[in-house]
Amino acid sequence: MSEPRWIWRCDHTIPSQAGAGRQVRQEVLGQLQRHHWVDHDIFSIHLALEEALVNAIKHGNGLDLAKQVRVSCRMSDDLVQIEIADEGDGFDPTRVPDPTDNRHRECPNGRGVMLMRSFMDRVEYNERGNCVLLEKRRTKTE
């Protein structure tokens, strides 16, 4: 499979503080709108991006202002890829409890990972578990 022809890209480094990802999120959503992505896709990417940023800032870096989060976004005519990396110790995504299982309903962990997997076409973590790749293909319209 050949490399997509990227029509837009951005790279940001943000501090590990609540709300720090707002500008990146707005930039990505603005580009999706400018390139006429359907609302459903924009909503999906918005939700997954928000969850991944919160996870990196809060859980990965522990809101430690000495640590940063790197965000890299790329868009082709029909694909968006977003990579978010924190400076934390990482985690094992296979050990995150399933929040839909009755045994874990009261546990707050795992909902963000589940939402990202539900709304994106591809969610992959690096071996260490401190970097996530989110990918969404554009919905075909008639």
Image: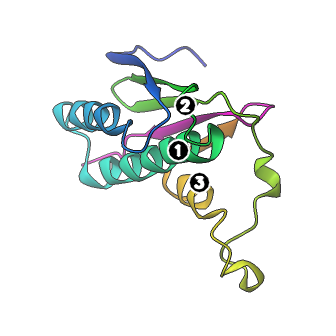
Tag 1's secondary structure?
Answer: helix
Marks 2/1 in contact by CB < 8 Å: the verdict is yes
Quarter-wise, where is residue 103 in the image? bottom right
What residue is shown at x 59% (from left), y 64% (from top)? 111
**Residue in the image at 57% along x and 40% along y:** 56
> In the image, residue 141 lies at what x, y percent?
27, 47
Q: Residue 84 carries which label?
A: 2
What element does badge 3 sit on? helix
Contact, mark 1 vs mark 3 (Cβ under 8 Å): no
In the drawing, what numbered circle is on residue 117?
3
The answer to whether residue 138 is left or right of residue 23 is right
Q: Where is residue 41 in the image (x, y as percent from the top left)?
A: 34, 49
The amino acid type of the residue labelled 2 equals: Ile
Q: Report the magenta residues as a range.
A: 126-142
Identify which residue, 56 or 134, lies in the foreground: 56
**Residue 93 in the image, given as x and y percentages of width and height:** 76, 49
Front residue of 124 and 110: 110
Among numbered discs 3 and 2, the one appearing first in the sequence? 2
How much space separates mark 3 and mark 2, taking CA atoms? 15 Å
10 Å neighbourhood of mark 3: few (<14), some, or many (≥20)?
Answer: some
Residue type, mark 3 in image? Arg
| Residue identifier under label 1 | 52
Mark nearer the viewer, 1 or 3:
1
Q: In this view, does 54 lie above or below 79?
A: below
The residue nearer to you, when weighing 77 against 131, is 131
Please state if 36 lies on the left or on the right of 51 as rendered: left
- Graded by Cα atoms within 10 Å as few (under 14), some (14 to 19) or many (20 or more), the crowding at tag 2 reads many
Mark 2 and mark 1: span between their CA atoms? 7 Å
**Residue at position x 74%, y 31% from top?**
126
N-terminal-most mark, 2 or 1: 1
Residue 24's disc is none
Name the amino acid type tagged 1. Answer: Ala
